[in-house]
Image (cartoon, rainbow, N blue to C red):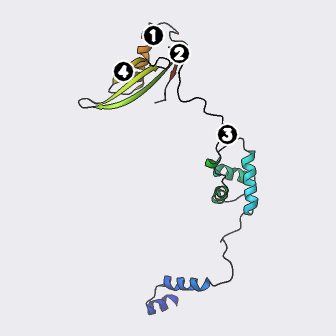
């Protein structure tokens, strides 16, 4: 009958339902969340979350690990609820940075003697006639001297090791002796 009346009057049923909802808004009962009640009140759940965080040997754990540990303890609740509570009380991972000592160094690595630490890196450039070119370098951390440089059209591991090979043969002699560059440390960025 409702659909027939709305069609007869030329009204949308959504308009009728919206009007009824406005009239129901004057209802004195306070609104409450639909669905079943949670496993615990927000204050009890927050206390359990804080207890989990304090008992954990790690820092910076996210809400999903806390939620999983709560479930393992038998306190079953929604992950969204755990996240909401942790966010409201500043307990999410970005708000709990790990305590650590001052920065171990000032950003420079200088050694006491040459041929102790070498650094290596690669950059790429474009040439007008040949296309891409990859340039590999190795630098001594004490003197700042180039110990090897190599340019190639490809960037594989053999090309990357060429400046090191050049430096070892120039600074330590022949490459065929075992342990020829023992004591040399190589720094790189895993590129």
Tag 3 residue:
99
Image position of 154 (left or right of 35): left
Disc 2 versus disc 4: nearer the observer: 2
Residue 39 image position (x, y, % from top left): 73, 62
Give the label, 3 or 4, closer to the camera.
Answer: 3
Horizontally, is 103 left or right of 56 in the view?
left
Q: Are marks 3 and 2 in contact (CB under 8 Å)?
A: no
Q: Secondary structure at mark 3?
A: loop
Name the quadrant of the C terminus.
top left
Whichever of labels 1 and 4 marks the residue nearer the N terminus, that label is 4
Give how far apart the Cα atoms at labels 3 and 4 are.
43 Å
Cα distance between the residues tagged 3 and 2: 33 Å
Seen at 69% across and 59% down, the residue is 77
Instruction: Give the camera-side residue of 156 and 147.
Output: 147
Question: For the residues marked 3 and 1, what is the alpha-carbon distance in whole angstroms?
Answer: 43 Å
SS label for mark 4 = strand
Say left or right for 122 vs 178: left
Give the number of the disc on residue 150: 4
**Residue 171 circle label:** 1
The earlier-in-sequence mark between 3 and 1 is 3
Q: Is residue 14 above or below residue 56?
A: below
Q: How far, Cα to Cα, is label 2 from label 4?
A: 21 Å
Closer to the chain start, of discs 2 and 4, is 2
Please give the name of the residue rendered at 39% of the width and 22% of the height, measured from the top-left corner: 159
Label 2 residue SS: loop
Residue 74 visible from this viewpoint: no
């Amino acid at each position: 009958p409702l659909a027939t009346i709305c069609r007869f009057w030329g009204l949308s049923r959504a308009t009728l339902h919206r009007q009824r909802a406005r009239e129901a808004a004057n209802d004195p009962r306070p609104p409450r969340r639909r669905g079943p009640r949670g496993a615990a009140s927000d204050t009890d759940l927050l206390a359990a979350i804080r207890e989990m965080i304090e008992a954990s040997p790690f820092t910076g754990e996210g809400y999903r690990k806390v939620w999983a540990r709560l479930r393992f303890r038998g306190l079953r609740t929604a992950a969204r609820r755990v996240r909401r509570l942790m966010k409201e009380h500043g307990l999410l991972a970005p708000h709990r940075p790990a305590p650590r000592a001052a920065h171990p160094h000032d950003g420079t690595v200088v050694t006491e003697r040459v041929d102790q630490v070498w650094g290596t890196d690669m950059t790429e450039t474009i040439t007008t006639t040949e296309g891409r070119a990859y340039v590999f370098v190795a630098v001594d951390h004490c003197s700042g001297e180039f110990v090897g440089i190599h340019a190639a059209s490809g960037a594989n591991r053999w090309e990357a090791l060429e400046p090191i090979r050049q430096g070892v043969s120039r600074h330590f002699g022949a490459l065929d002796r075992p342990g020829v560059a023992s004591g040399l440390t190589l720094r790189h960025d895993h590129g």
